[in-house]
Amino acid sequence: MPRPRFVTACLPACLLAGCTSVAGPAPGTVEFRAAQVSRAYDCGLRVDRAGVIAGLPQAERRRFVLANAAYAVKSYNAPKRCESGERETLQLALRPARR
């Protein structure tokens, strides 16, 4: 059975739109860490921001602070609701390192 022309024509555009809206900072970067901290605040979690900054190399601390400030501004439009899985993932990711 042949597909309707509309579906055939719109499918690539719909797939491409889905791919571009997911882009964000790459995991392992300072910007990714800043995004995690910002999202944790959105979820209502307690975050030891000073501890996160202290755990970063000296050269990357300024980048973190700048990125975190940018994400804080964007978070006003972010959804405030968090699923339990997302909350647990953030808690594990932002847990202070044992010394």
Image (cartoon, grey):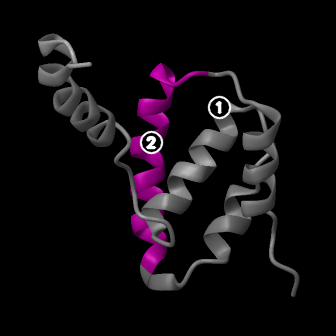
Residue 20 - label: none
| Residue under the point 64% across and 22% down | 80
Residue 52 location, x and y as percent?
A: 67, 66
Amino acid type shown at disc 2: Tyr
Residue 74, above or below 37: above
**In this picture, residue 29 sits left or right of residue 90:** left
Q: Residues within 10 Å of mark 1 (few under 14, many from 20)?
A: some
Q: Residue 42 lies in magenta, yes or no?
A: no
| Residue under the point 42% across and 31% down | 74
Which residue is label 2 attached to? 71
> Which image quadrant for residue 43?
top right
- 33 and 89: which one is in front? 89
Q: Is residue 94 in sight in this rendering?
A: no
Residue 99, above or below 60: below
| Residue under the point 61% across and 40% down | 39
Q: Earlier in the sequence, mark 2 or mark 1?
A: 1
**In this picture, residue 85 sits left or right of residue 64:** right
Q: Which corner quadrant holds the N terminus?
A: top left
Q: Main secondary structure of the magenta part?
A: helix
Quote the CA–CA distance across marks 2 and 1: 11 Å
Callout 2 secondary element: helix
Residue 31 location, x and y as percent?
A: 43, 60
Q: Give, as a single range, the part of the protein colored magenta.
A: 60-79
Which residue is label 1 attached to? 42
Residue 70, above or below 77: below
- 25 and 61: which one is in front? 25
